[in-house]
Image (cartoon, rainbow, N blue to C red):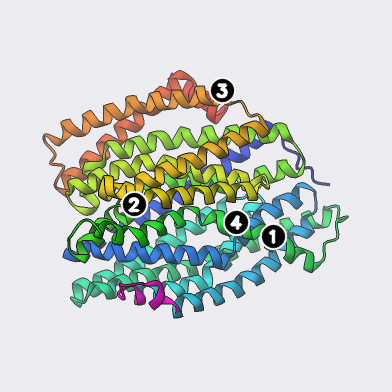
Amino acid sequence: MNNNRANPADSQAKMLKGSAWMTFGSIISRVLGVIYIIPWYAWMGAYGNIANALTAKSYNIYSLFLIVSTAGIPGAVAKQIAKYNALDEYRVGQKLFKHGLALMALFGVLCAMIMYFAAPILAAEDLRQVPVLRSLAFAVVVIPVMSIFRGYFQGYSNMMPSAMSQFVEQLARVIWILLTAYVIMRVQHGNYLAAVTQSNLAAFVGAIFGILLLCVFYLRQKRQVDQWIADSQGNLQVSTGSLFLEIIQQSIPFIIIDSGITLYQLIDQYTFHPLIASFVHVSYDQIESWYALFGLNANKLIMVTVSIATAMAVTAIPLLSGAHAQKNWQDIAYQLENTLQLFFFVMIPASFGMAAISRPIYTVFYGPDPLGTAILVQSAITAITLGFFTVLLAMQQGLSENGLAIKYLLTGLVIKLVLQYPMILLFNVFGPLTATNVAMLLTIGMSLKHLHVKYRFNQQRLVHRILGMIGFSVVMLVSVMLAVHLFGLVLSPDRRLPALINVVISTLLGAGIYIVLVLKSGLAEKVLGSRITRLRAKLHI
């Protein structure tokens, strides 16, 4: 019989290993998804911001369809597989996965058809979005199936297949984007809309490669899983109908909660243009260019750091679900505290660092733009809010508190809608992110208070460590800002190559300062565990 009852040390090891893999997959994928922008944006020429606005708007709609098409089933399956594995009922988990796979294939086809034929309606006034949306519909057919495979591996707390498939998927996608954009814009001297359409079709191409790799991992793991099934208790008999009902019951909250950030972005997408046009009289394309500054340009860069939070959230759900199934309240409290401090340990310095290098890094990707740089600074700080929001709601999902998580999310969305117009009126292009921050901070406050009251994690210790992280990050922020300024005297921040050199040197300096401070203070050891002790000894810190 397999005993999955976890102790705090095992939980921390699983969390760190899972987070490491998911962070690797997310970060590498995000980095690839950002780097391609440099040549792609340049090849778009004068249409760069308009092309980005089209991409951002189409992707927001696509993201919502993707969440609905997967119906939250991958996350629900990961959670339920972890639950049954913790109860030593591997056979039920395997049956759950197979039924989920069939549902995914069906949902993918249905949602793709709706997205394809409804594209003219979804495009609203801008019919340029229609071919872009239709090119994304093909990805909706296959990505749900790929997602269920990822949920299956995550249910076993095996994050490596998901991470590697993310990398392969993104690599294939980026190759297709660059190849088609170069041929259309440089060789054929074609139009930017055709290039944007092909760039979005790349999501389908990448998904094909990702799912093929996951199939390989599944076949490799099958022998081990079959052995666990043979050795498991087999006392729990669950009918097919019950499994489908369980999947649907678990998946509906996942649809709503996983749509959280996308719903905030859709509010911006459908309200920013008409609201700002009501009191600022400029051309249609000028407003679209302003939207691109925060809707895609800055968002593309900060999502590299937000992906860290997503990686940790995915890792936390099955671990918390397993502890909850066993009613291991001590382990739940430990997991909550460990997840939050690990999140802040990476997220705070990453966001502060992005703000510090905002001017040269914006130049590297999009060219010099004071307004774009200012929005990137605001977005970098917003990344902490977005990440914290993601982690907290994911933890509530893992603890089967879906109803409360949905309540908090909907409350935040209502606040966002109420604040949207006054914030845009007061702050113009900075308004949407300001409204998002206020709404999410209120959601975060409600969720955090509830988790502390119910599970009694060590809030005092957590706050003490977070203050240390903020203090070290501020030292790093000031140092990097000074370095960017001094290097800028000889390396022009308004030219791509000098700006890139400035970014690399300043980033390495900032990372070095933060790492030395957390190692020397012992904070890294408290957050990451005993392995850091050996690292400190080797570095003589």
Query: Is 49 or 281 nearer to us in this picture?
Result: 281
Residue drawn where x is 55% and y is 68% of the image: 69
Separation of disc 2 and disc 1 at Cα? 36 Å
Q: What amino acid is labelled 2 in the image?
A: Tyr
Classify residue 343 as left or right of residue 502: right
Residue drawn where x is 26% and y is 56% of the image: 276
Query: Is 405 or 140 nearer to us in this picture?
Result: 405
Separation of disc 2 and disc 4 at Cα? 29 Å
Residue 421 marker = 2
x and y, in percent, of residue 234 in the image: 86, 56
Q: What amino acid is labelled 1 in the image?
A: Gln
Q: Vertical placement of 205 versus 5: above or below? A: below
Circle 3: is it few (<14), some (14-19), or many (20+) Cα within 10 Å?
few
In front of the other: label 3 or label 2? 2
Would you say the residues marked 4 and 3 are in contact, meaning their CB atoms lie under 8 Å apart? no
Which secondary structure lies at badge 4? helix
Taking the magenta stretch, the answer to whether it contains residue 20 is: no
Q: Quadrant of the C terminus?
A: top left
Instruction: Read off the magenta span.
Output: 118-131
**Mark 1 or mark 3: whose residue is earlier in sequence:** 1
Q: What amino acid is labelled 3 in the image?
A: Arg
Which residue is identified by label 3?
Answer: 461
Separation of disc 4 and disc 3 at Cα? 31 Å
